Structures are given as C-alpha cells and as structure tokens.
Amino acid sequence: MIVVTGGTGFVGSRLQQLLAARGLPHRAPSRLELDVTAPDAAALEGATAVVHLAAYIPRDHANPAEAEACMRANALGTLELLRASVAAGVRRFVCASSGNIYRAQPRPVAEDDPIYPSARAPYYLASKVAAETFADHFDRAGMLSVAIARISSVYGPGMIAAGMLHAFVSRLRSGALVEVQDGGRYRTDLVYVDDVALGLANLLDSPVRGPINLGAGHAPTALEVATLLAELTGCDASALRVLPPVRGEPPLGFSALDIRRAIEELGYAPRSLRDGLSAYLGSLA
C-alpha cells in the first residue's frame, strides 16, 4: 500500500491516476485522517511506501511572518511523518522538495551543486531544505530508504490560477495585451505535471536514494515562454509588450535542473516545452 500525502493536490491527483493505471494499491488520507504536523502511526498501518507531497505554500513568499508556518508544516511536519513512517514499518519514503533551492548558476544545476535559497521565496525554500535534511538523516541512519525529489516549476492541467504562465495564457486567450516584465529576463525550469508524476512513481520501486532532480532540464525566459504561447494560440508578436529590463538589477529566476541522474536511473524523459504547453492549452479547450 502506497500512502500519498497531498494526494488531492495538483501533482498528487495526477500521481494517484498513474498509480491506479499501474494497478498499485494506494490511498490519500485527508488532513483529518493524517495531520502531518502530528501524524498517528496508525494512519499509516499497512503502508509499505509514502510519497510526501503535502506542503504549506505561503501566499506572500516575501513576508517573513510566513517563516514560522513554513517551518512548522514543511520541516517539522516532514520530521513527524518520517517518525510515524518508521513506527508503522514503512520501507520506502519519497520526499517532494523544490528544485529552486539551488544557488543560481548560469548552467543546469546538479544534485551536488550548492543550495542557498536566499534570492527568492527564502522562508518556503528554507523549510524545504530543512525537510530534506531530516529525510536524508533518516536514510543515512538506516531507518528508511529515502529518495528526495527536487521538483522544478510544475505546470499543466489543474494548476492553480496564478503565476506567470496562467497570466500569459489568460490574456492571450481573451485577446488582451500581454505585458512581459523586466525585458522577459526571468527564467525558470518549467516541467509538465505528468512527467513529474511519472518520475515520482518510478522512484517508488527504484533503488535511488538521496536527492534527484525532476525538471525539464531547460530554463526558458519569460519572453521565450510568452512568444511560444502566442504562436500556439494563433497570436502574433503584437500581442506582446516587452517592458525594458530594470536598470541595475540582475535578472530574476531559477536555474535549469541537470536531469541526467533521473534520465539514467529512472528512465525519465520529460516532454519539450512546446509539447507540454500544447497539451496544457488543449486541456483548456
């Protein structure tokens, strides 16, 4: 039996569909059944594996008042779930982390690159680093077999109605002008939700331990994303208004993930941005 926390969320719901298609018994306890901040080992009875996707994501990533909630839910919550998993006899634990915890690099970042998430979303990302630390300790201490999935920026059907991609699509589909901020320099590794679900499912029965990147392996700029979306929605360049870069400020964003380990050890093969955006747009029709 596989227990999925956050199973009704964006990635969790797709993972559940995939597990069902593979004929794998699984369940996604509600928050009333399994409170990760104070989990009861009885709620994990019969589980052989846990995929921990549940997380607290603050509305305002720049607000330091969110730090306590992030640490309580994401860091200490993961620790308590690890303890409950050991008590319940769980053998495999897949911990979902963030691919945005790395120090920014001009190249794809690998699992052994430095992590230092101080540029953006520091309170949320620091809580994910702390959760990773606890999870990795349980693995090194021989209490659980743990894989840590460092997941980049996920998009696709069912994603929340917020953020750059949603804003671009909404305005293009309504015929409104799309304003691309800061010269379109912002970068992030956009990975399709089904590719992440497949990577997580493959981690369950693999010998992979420790951190492993699940991204697309490429970090397009906001301008590249907007231009491709305009093409896919049948709009021309006049639908975009690119505002000048902010003078004296470095471009914002996150590095692409080096996904060679996932490719080699999980058979991971994420789709291209064009294919993923086409599939996402098709789901909106």
Image (cartoon, rainbow, N blue to C red):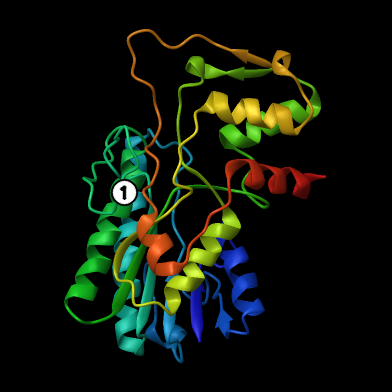
Q: Amino acid at mark 1?
A: Glu
Tell me the residue at 63%/49% (across/down): 156
Q: Determine the residue located farthest toward the front in the rendered image.
A: 264
Residue 166 visible:
yes
Left or right relative to 232: residue 86: left
Foreground of the two, 45 or 169: 169
- Which residue: 36% across, 51% down? 69
Q: Position of residue 225 (x, y in %)?
A: 58, 31
Q: Nearer the viewer, residue 205 or 253?
A: 205
Q: Quadrant of residue 229?
A: top right
Quarter of the rendering containing residue 277: top right
The quadrant in which the C terminus is found is: top right
Q: Is residue 102 above or below residue 167?
A: below
The furthest residue to the left: 141
24 horizontally vs 125: left or right? right
Query: Residue 217: x percent and y percent?
Result: 44, 46
> Residue 55 placed where, x, y %?
44, 57
Q: Residue furthest right?
A: 285
Q: Residue at x 50, y 15 (%)?
A: 183
- According to the picture, the residue beneath numbered tag 1 turns out to be 68
